[in-house]
Amino acid sequence: MAKTSSAQPWKKGRGKLGPMAPLLGKWKASTDTPMGPVSCVREYAKFGDGYVRLDAEWNFKAAKEGASKVYREVCLFGPDKDGVLTYWSYTNDGKKSSGKLSEATDVHPEAVCFEAQMDAGLARQVFWPNEKGGINWAVEARNKKGWNRFSLHHYEAAS
C-alpha cells in the first residue's frame, strides 16, 4: 500500500472525517501551468473535533517580465447539516465554493473525491496515493465524454 508520508500509510480513518486521514499533514508540489511555473504548499490539520482545515498557497513565478502571483485558499472539511462530508472553500481572489464527498474509483480504488457544482458546471477534486509515497491531486470538469482533467499535482511530504 502506498504511503503518504514516512509515518502515515494511505488509510482512511473512522467517522465522518475518516476519508481525510490520509491527507493530514503538510504537502508540497511544483509543476508547470498555462500561467507559468507554480509551487504549492497544502497543509491539512484537524480543526477541533469535527473539521479539517486546509491552508493552501500557490506561488506562480513571474513569466519573463511579469509579476509573480500568490493565490491562497482556506477550506474547511466537515459534516454538513445532514451529516455528509462537505468542504467550504474561500480564496484570496474572492471566490467561494463548496462540494460534497463523492467517489472516483475510475481514478483510483482508494481515491478521496469531492464534487461541486460550479458556474461552468460540475467539477471534482480527487486525491489518491502515488507510487512515490505522496499524494496525487487532480481537478476535473464534467463534460459530455466524461471527466476532463485540467490540473494535476504530485505532492510529497513537506517539512
Image (cartoon, rainbow, N blue to C red):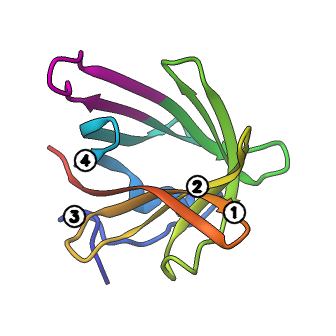
Residue at point 36%, 71% (across, down): 129
In the displayed orientation, state which residue is furthest to the front: 64
How far is mark 4 from mark 2, CA to CA? 32 Å
How far is mark 3 from mark 2, CA to CA? 19 Å
Which quadrant holds residue 76? Answer: top right
Is there any visible trace of residue 50 in the rendered image? no
Kindly identify which residue carries mark 2.
Answer: 17
The circle drawn on residue 7 is 3
User: Relative to 138, does residue 45 appear above or below in the rendering?
Assistant: above
Closer to the chain start, of discs 2 and 1, is 2
- Secondary structure of residue under mark 3: loop
User: Relative to 75, does residue 13 appear above or below in the rendering?
Assistant: below
Closer to the chain start, of discs 1 and 3, is 3
What amino acid is labelled 1 in the image?
A: Asn
Closer to the chain start, of discs 3 and 4, is 3
The residue segment tinted magenta is 55-73
Report x, y in % for residue 128: 42, 69
Residue 65 vs residue 47, the one in the foreground:
65
Dot 3 and dot 4 residues touching (CB under 8 Å)? no
Kindly identify which residue carries mark 4.
Answer: 32
Residue 131 vs residue 10, the one in the foreground:
131
Residue at point 31%, 44% (across, down): 33
Closer to the chain start, of discs 3 and 2, is 3
User: Relative to 95, does residue 138 appear above or below in the rendering?
Assistant: below
What amino acid is labelled 2 in the image?
A: Leu
What amino acid is labelled 4 in the image?
A: Asp
Kindly identify which residue carries mark 1.
Answer: 143
Is there any visible trace of residue 74 in the rendered image? yes
Whether residue 66 appears in magenta in the rendering, the answer is yes
The circle drawn on residue 16 is none
Q: Quadrant of the C terminus?
A: top left
What amino acid is labelled 3 in the image?
A: Ala
